[in-house]
Amino acid sequence: MTDSEAWPRSAAAFAEAVKLMPGGVNSPVRAFKSVGLTPPFIQRGEGAYLYDIDGHKYIDYVSSWGPLILGHRHPEVVDALEKTLREMGTSFGAPTELENELAREITTAMPAVEMVRLVNSGTEATMSALRLARGYTGREKVVKFAGCYHGHADYFLIQAGSGALTFGIPNSPGVPATVAANTIVAPYNDLAAVEDIFQKAGEEIAAVIVEPVAGNMGCVPPLTGFLAGLRTITKEYGSLLIFDEVMTGFRVAFGGAQALYGIRPDLTCLGKIIGGGLPVGAYGGRREIMERVAPSGPIYQAGTLSGNPLAVSAGLATLKVLKKPGTYERLESLSARLEKGLKEAAAEAGVPVTFNRVGAMFTTFFNPGPVTDYATATASDTRAFAAFFRAMLRQGIYLAPSQFEAAFMSLAHREDDIDCTIAAAREAFKGIA
Ligand code: PLP
């Protein structure tokens, strides 16, 4: 069946969208280009399910790219939003007690975050954290890892040149060469490469920024000692260690990857879950560094809608549910059930896959593995992935439309959703074996 037969209303909506918006979307991966489809247009979400305008129902593993750890329209989030809207309003550009409450929740959950500033997106969080790191250290260079994504600011849109430790090259036209020259790209999980970079340029490096569990080349966990090694090296050279926990914060553990692995970064970036599905971001860290942010210090960063009461209410309601006993155990058991079933289904069909998972965040790589960095992730068979993706979508399983993204389990998923997903995968793997 072609797209327009299975999704006639979506196909028509997309045909209109491409005339109105670049690629028909407001964020590139939504276009489904790499899997050879056009996207279903969403009508609504409920719990673990998405419904499209063509009448299809899907089990959702995208979860709006991570924020919806409680599923769609969780009653406590809906109640909080309604209450704030009715009793408060949409935005004031002035302080509210809600902001204190969210700041208190974050700083309590993450002891390394002694003070926090709320912003409106993960991109804003990382760009502000880097400005702060540069202002604080008086240095300009930043080390990032190939395959890690930290939002779309110029100095992060850099990828590695042939895996070597080279000074960055822009991979998006529009990124000035002078900006790119200050970004040094290292292979993920390669401490020796980082040591080498620091031996050459350590005194010039303001910060190392890392996804402590990478999610943006697919899910790639840190190898034992990698994060601790980054902590040691940055400390030795007086550089800051920035954990980009936009994806992992409150997902891999309530206290994020820093709690899971027991590492104390200088700065932490957050987003996604702390806004419960509304636009949000945050950056925070050591008090003496955060006090350099305006107006207590000279490093400027501001936002009309920052600390927005609706986003903060949705975030607070989400964290309140997550704090209940047993939530992370539940996420783990659902995710482990899926892992076991998918691995068995792939093995039965004779399809070589590597399943990387940290808690409720995971990727099935079409690659015998191990997948530990950008080079091994990009060695995956993207054509097999695309075929798998299409077969899953047609059976009502909504995955991220790219091999290089993580999937997310939510508390709304049930065992029978997982079993349905495994049954669908068994068929999908058969089709590509
Ligand atoms: N950092 C990480 C680790 C992310 O996964 C993302 C988005 O997916 C961002 C930063 C950027 O966040 P946003 O899309 O909210 O700007």
Image: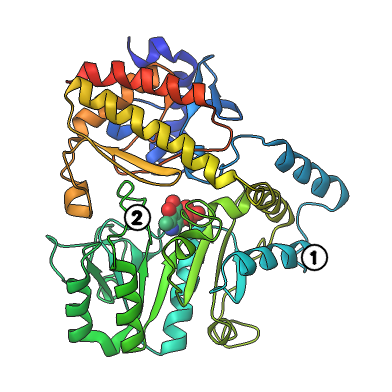
Apparent side of residue 45 relative to residue 370 in the rendered image (left or right)? right
Please name the residue shown 43% across and 67% down the image.
243
Provide residue 369's location: percent of width, then percent of height.
17, 44
- Residue in front for this viewpoint, 314 or 9: 314
- At label 1, counting other C-alpha atoms closer than 10 Å, the crowd grade (few under 14, some 14-19, many 20 or more) is few
In the depicted structure, whether residue 41 falls above or below residue 271: above
Q: Which residue does the numbered mark 1 point to in the structure image? A: 97
Q: Secondary structure at mark 1?
A: helix
Please name the residue shown 50% across and 21% down the image.
416
Please name the residue shown 22% across and 74% down the image.
194
- Residue in front for this viewpoint, 120 or 383: 383
In the depicted structure, whether residue 77 falls above or below residue 216: above
| Amino acid type, mark 1 | Glu
In the depicted structure, whether residue 432 falls above or below residue 165: above
* Residue 105 appears in the figure: yes
Q: Which residue does the numbered mark 2 point to in the structure image? A: 214
Marks 2,1: beta carbons within 8 A: no
Q: Secondary structure at mark 2?
A: loop
Apparent side of residue 373 relative to residue 413 in the rendered image (left or right)? left
Provide residue 313's location: percent of width, then percent of height.
73, 52
Number of marks drawn: 2
Apparent side of residue 61 relative to residue 81 in the rendered image (left or right)? left
* Residue 62 appears in the figure: no
- Ligand 1 sits in which quadrant? bottom left
| Amino acid type, mark 2 | Ala
- Distance of label 2 from label 1 (alpha carbons): 34 Å
Q: Nearer the viewer, mark 2 or mark 1?
A: 2
> Looking at the image, is mark 2 or mark 1 earlier in the sequence?
1
- Looking at the rendered image, the quarter that the C terminus falls into is top left
- At label 2, counting other C-alpha atoms closer than 10 Å, the crowd grade (few under 14, some 14-19, many 20 or more) is many
Provide residue 89's location: percent of width, then percent of height.
82, 52
Provide residue 431's location: percent of width, then percent of height.
22, 16
